[in-house]
Image (cartoon, grey):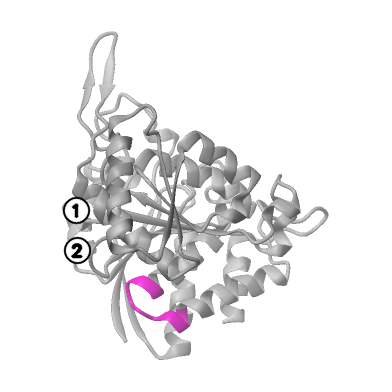
Amino acid sequence: MRATIAVLPGDGIGPEVTAEGVRALRAVAIKFGHDFEFREGIIGGCSIDKTGTALPPETLALCQGADAVLLGAVGGPKWDDPNASVRPEQGLFAIRKALGLFANLRPVTCHPKLAAASPLKAEVLKGVDLLVVRELTGGLYFGEKKKFADSASDLLAYTGDEIRRVVRRAAEFARGRRKKLTSVDKANVLETSRLWRRVTEEVVRKEFPDVALEHILVDSCAMYLMRRPATFDVIVTENMFGDILTDEASVLSGSMGLLPSASLGEGKQGLYEPIHGSAPDIAGKGIANPYATILSTAMLLRYSLGLEAEAAAVEKAVDAAIDRDVLTGDIALAGGKSASTGEAGLAVVAAL
């Protein structure tokens, strides 16, 4: 297979972890006989410094012409003024919108060896294997914003069609897993959540009668993720709720440095990135965990390129590296040696 992959390293530790993601993809190409072409672009804070915008037209065109996009992270203290007219995260919002990527997939599992890295008891983590599908282009983050001298507002708005398409995606994944879908909302307070619940009910009842549907309020879901996470299969929710819940869910795996994500639309093109941020405090030190980015490349292989065997090989290689105790500082076991970013990446390639 021939494929073009746009690589957007971004800011902070982004360049370090995306380099390991590309290294893993190059190893896959050699092992399985593929031809991957990598084209690099700028986004986020580094793009603001160079072009004055968080997503220059050249980067967007590069991504639109690629089969998939691999992203590092954006942001940092240098661009952290909340009153700034141009901010790094605007690049993320813009590229998701421009590429029509409305469903963000965030799988959460716990490697048995890393149970000690989580603050939760090992018995709570047993059997955790869930997928959060977060709506990505609507809600508060994209609603009309108003600012006055002593007040401000953000509009939370959803249409039925926006809800239908992401719920369909989530139900499709549930159908291929354990056939259980949990819809998370705040229907006791918000009109948008009441619409969300009604539309979700209609879609699942009519199109996915074999999928069991439950509705949970977002505050209850936050508690259940810590108390009984293994009871979840697929969770679908709106933009801001999904953003918060998936960061919370990273506690289950032991570190944000282990969780990948995929942002998908109607077609095969997608954007793949670790859920963590740019971590400017450790940037340039060679100690960032690359496993989330490498696991994101597995999702890229699976969803955009249709290469299931290759995706599974990458995931098994990450497991093998962890089994060999190649652990970066965020997940290193007590008394164990911490691996560098490059050492972790090389361990995955060796396992491949």
309 is within the stretch colored magenta: yes
The answer to whether marks 2 and 1 mark residues whose Cβ atoms lie closer than 8 Å is yes
Vertical placement of residue 142 versus 274, above or below:
above
Going by the numbered disc 2, the residue's amino acid type is Gln
- Residue at the spot x=75%, y=48% of the render? 121
Dominant SS type (magenta): helix
* Quarter occupied by residue 336: bottom right
Secondary structure beneath label 2: helix
In this view, the residue farthest toward the bottom is: 33
Q: Which amino acid is tagged 1?
A: Ala
Q: Which residue is mark 1?
A: 98
> Residue 182 or 28: which is nearer the viewer?
182
In the image, residue 147 sits, relative to residue 216, either above or below, namely: above
* Dot 1 alpha-carbon crowd within 10 angstroms: few under 14, some 14 to 19, many 20 or more: few
Image quarter where the C terminus lies is bottom right
The earlier-in-sequence mark between 2 and 1 is 2
**Is residue 268 found inside the magenta-colored segment of the image?**
no
Question: Quick check: 326 left or right of 138?
Answer: right
Residue 135 placed where, x, y %?
Answer: 33, 48
Q: Residues in magenta?
A: 301-310
The vertical placement of 169 against 217, above or below, is: below
- Please name which of the two marks, 2 or 1, marks the residue nearer to the observer: 1
Label 2 – label 1 distance at C-alpha: 9 Å
**Image quadrant in which the N terminus is located:** bottom left
Task: Report whether residue 150 is seen.
Answer: yes
The image quarter containing residue 184 is top left
From the top left corner, tell me how far across and down residue 154 is, in percent.
Answer: 27, 26
Q: As rendered, which of 234 and 336 lies closer to the eye?
A: 234
Note whether residue 288 is visible.
no
Residue 64 — which label? 2
